Image (tube, rainbow, N blue to C red):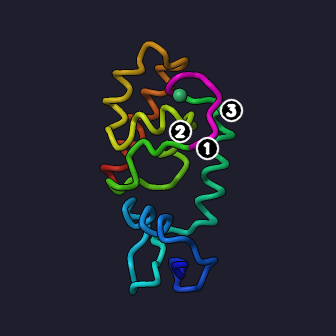
Amino acid sequence: MINVLNIDGQPLTPCVLDRAWREVNRARAVWIDEETIQLLYNPFLFRDYRKAALKRDHYTCLWCGRPGKTVDHIIPSSKGGSDLPRNLIAACMECNTKRGSRSAFSYFREKVYSAPHKIKLFYRIVKANVHHQVN
Ligand SMILES: [Zn+2]
C-alpha cells in the first residue's frame, strides 16, 4: 500500500500502487518518496464538486444524452484543468473513455449530432476554456 498525504500534509487512507500512479499521471499528486504520494488537490472538495456537477447536469451525459454517472473534465486534469464544477460535465463511462485526453472541441465535433443540448454544451466548453486561459 502507498501512503497518501493531503494537500496540507495530513495522512489520508493509504491506496494501492495502481491508484497512486493514476493520480500522479493525471497531475493530481506527486511522489514524496517510494511509498508516499502527496495530493495536489483536496479530495473532499472534489467529491462535493463532482456531486454538484452531476446533479446540475441531471445525471445525464452531455455528450450523448444517456445516463451519466461519471464526470468529464472539459480541460483535462493532465493539462491543468481545474476540479471546479464549471470545468466538469456529467458523462457516461463510454464517452468519458472514448474522449480520453482529446480536447473537448475535438470530441464535440464528433458528437455534435448526438449531443441533446449542443448549444448548452458548446457554451460550457467555451466558458471553461475562457476561465482556463484567464487563470
Ligand atoms: Zn455519453
Residue 63, position as x, y percentages in the image: 50, 26
Mark 1 vs 2: CB contact within 8 A: yes
Circle 2 crowding by C-alpha within 10 Å: few under 14, some 14–19, many from 20: many
- Image quadrant containing the C terminus: bottom left
| Residue at image point 67% right, 34% down | 59
| Residue at image point 63% right, 29% down | 60
Closer to the N terminus: mark 3 or mark 2?
Answer: 3
Under 8 Å from ligand 1: the CB of mark 2? no
The Cα atoms of the two marked residues, 1 and 2, are separated by 6 Å
Instruction: Give the amino acid at mark 1.
Output: Ala
Closer to the N terminus: mark 3 or mark 1?
Answer: 1
Residue toward you, 102 or 117 = 102
Residue toward you, 79 or 132 = 79
The range drawn in magenta is 63-70
Closer to the N terminus: mark 1 or mark 2?
Answer: 1
The residue that mark 3 highlights is 58
Q: Is residue 7 above or below residue 89?
A: below
Q: Quadrant of residue 105?
A: top left
Residue 79, position as x, y percentages in the image: 32, 53
Residue 48 magenta-drawn? no
The residue that mark 1 highlights is 53
Please, what secondary structure does the residue beneath circle 1 have? helix
Mark 3 vs 2: CB contact within 8 A: no
Mark 3 vs 1: CB contact within 8 A: no
Q: How many marks?
A: 3
